Image (cartoon, grey):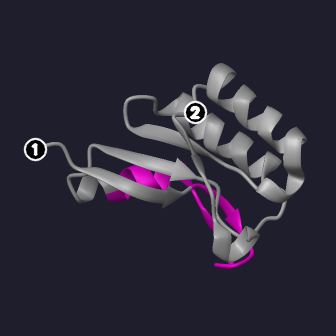
Amino acid sequence: MKVIDALSYVGKSLYFKREFKVEDLIERMNSNGIEMAVITAPPPGPDYREANKIVYEAVKKYPERLMGFYKINPWFGKEELERAKYAVKEWNFKGLKLDPKDDG
């Protein structure tokens, strides 16, 4: 059976007052028998552009272990939707992460 972590963060978070490093995530995955993780930018926003780039770089470094979801803030409207489309088409993100608690 393949074990997949459905939500992990990579990047800096003021909310959690820490940085989620991809190497630490991979180490925890290895120690717990997790084969793959879905990763996204940590809260809070509102602007996730830089954080999404960090997720992209992490997936590029560990493509067999990580699957990126683009953290989208719908309050940025059409421009944000265009960035999300680009992330899916060009960066190979597999989905979108909406966070109504932080961006609602």
Q: Which residues are magenta?
A: 10-28
Residue located beneath label 2 in the image: 93
Q: Could you tell me the amino acid type at mark 2? A: Phe
Classify residue 103 as left or right of residue 62: right
The N terminus: image quadrant:
top left
Left or right of 93 in this view: 62: left
Q: Secondary structure at mark 2?
A: loop
Amino acid at dot 1:
Met
In the rendered view, tell whether residue 97 sits above or below residue 20: above
The 10 Å Cα crowd at callout 2, few under 14, some 14 to 19, many 20 or more, is many
- Which residue lies at the image location 57% right of the left edge and 33% below the top edge? 93
Q: Residue at x 44, y 48 (%)?
A: 38
The foreground one among 98 and 71 is 98
Give the SS element for disc 1. Answer: loop
Q: Name the N-terminal-most of marks 1 and 2.
A: 1
> How many residues crowd around disc 1 within 10 Å: few (fewer than 14), some, or many (20 or more)?
few
Residue 1 is labelled as 1
Q: Is residue 16 part of the magenta span, yes or no? A: yes
**Does the magenta run of residues contain 23?**
yes
* Closer to us: 90 or 85: 85
Q: Name the side, left or right, on which 48 lies relative to 97.
A: right
Which x, y percent locates residue 32? Answer: 23, 59
Q: Quadrant of residue 70?
A: top right
Residue plotted at (84% across, 59% down): 75
Asked whether residue 32 is in view, the answer is yes
Residue 28 is situated, as x and y percent measured from the top left of the image, at 35, 59
Viewed as shown, does residue 7 lie left or right of 79? left
